[in-house]
Image: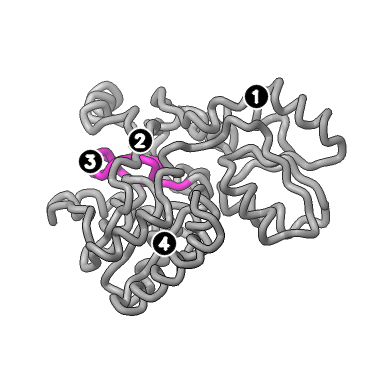
Amino acid sequence: MPNNDDRKTLCDEIQRLKREKDALILAHYYQRLDVQLIADIYGDSFELSKKARLSDKKLAIFCGVSFMAESVKILNPEKTVLLPEPSAGCRMADMVTAADVVALREKYPDAAVVCYVNSSAETKAVSDICCTSSNAVNVVGSLKNKQIIFIPDKNLGAYVAKFLPDKEFILHSGWCPIHHGITTDEVKAAKNEHPGALVTVHPECEPEVSALADYVGSTSQMIDFCEKSDAKEFIVGTEVGVVERLNYYNPDKKFHLLTPHTVCDDMKRTTLESVLAALRGEVDEVRLTPGQIERARLPLERMMQINT
């Protein structure tokens, strides 16, 4: 971690090169706070892809993990998209492959395949429609199919199923290592330690954990809930970067990380140094063929056509 003087030097040089190269820096909420603070746009993974579409800049530096950078490229094929840390992946996205989807289709031919955006371009390409954690209920509810193959996150799928009892869900076995690891005992311990604090968790948590929360929502929804609520103290069950951000921008409120193990090592790979290196060398470009982009774009576009 650079000291304050080194951090300022790095930030100044990043800003100078960003202006010189007319680049756009995007950062996910789970990034280190100093990386979030140098970004032009920050947000949820798919939110970043959509916002990138509104920019006329042709060079995008994506501070996040590989599947997210792919989504930016898929929706912005004319842009050069750089991933400063190309080894930053997602264990949940890796839990499902295109071959898995094809096998599920053969077993359940009448089912629609709903693919969480936390997945690879190859997996998206063999799915019917994508969803995010914030719009999944509306996306699935819009489909005529009774059977729904939901990939890859079984916990998000189970959360959606509660709202749509008329649907039959075939849940893939994937899960997020950060959210799935939160336990009911940890929620109860946090409530005991901070009595009166509201609990908010992500729907990637197990159903038993979500049932103990005052509010369940996507990362952006959790942030909105905490910032707009009249309450002054919160227990936050998601990646530590969100808590760091909430504390930074809301000094009049208290935010407690539900458990100390919600740290995504892949999200933390990106540093100010790696952002600067990406800007300087314009290396580690996200590369997809036109065919890959077209096939993966269709499920994303179908999602975006739904009023969510």
Q: Answer left or right for 298 relative to 162.
A: left
Label 3 and label 4: CA atoms lie apart by: 23 Å
Residue that numbered label 4 is attached to: 26
Q: Secondary structure at mark 1?
A: helix
Neighbor class of circle 2 (other Cα within 10 Å; few <14, some 14-19, many 20+) is many
**Residue 132 in the image: x percent, y percent?**
46, 47
- Mark 4: amino acid: Leu
In the depicted structure, whether residue 243 falls above or below residue 188: below
**Residue 6 in the image: x percent, y percent?**
48, 61
Mark found first going from the N terminus, 3 or 2 = 2
Residue shown at the point (40%, 41%) measured from the top left: 116
- For the record, the magenta segment spans 116-132
Q: Secondary structure at mark 3?
A: helix
Label 2 and label 4: CA atoms lie apart by: 20 Å
Label 3 and label 2: CA atoms lie apart by: 11 Å
Neighbor class of circle 4 (other Cα within 10 Å; few <14, some 14-19, many 20+) is many
- Mark 3: amino acid: Glu
Mark found first going from the N terminus, 3 or 4 = 4
Of the pair 5 and 99, the residue shown nearer to us: 5
* Marks 3,2: beta carbons within 8 A: no
Type of colouring: one colour
Residue that numbered label 3 is attached to: 122
Circle 1 or circle 4, nearest the eye: 4
Mark found first going from the N terminus, 1 or 3 = 3
Residue that numbered label 1 is attached to: 208
* Marks 1,4: beta carbons within 8 A: no
Label 1 and label 2: CA atoms lie apart by: 23 Å
**123 in the magenta segment:** yes
Circle 1 or circle 2, nearest the eye: 2
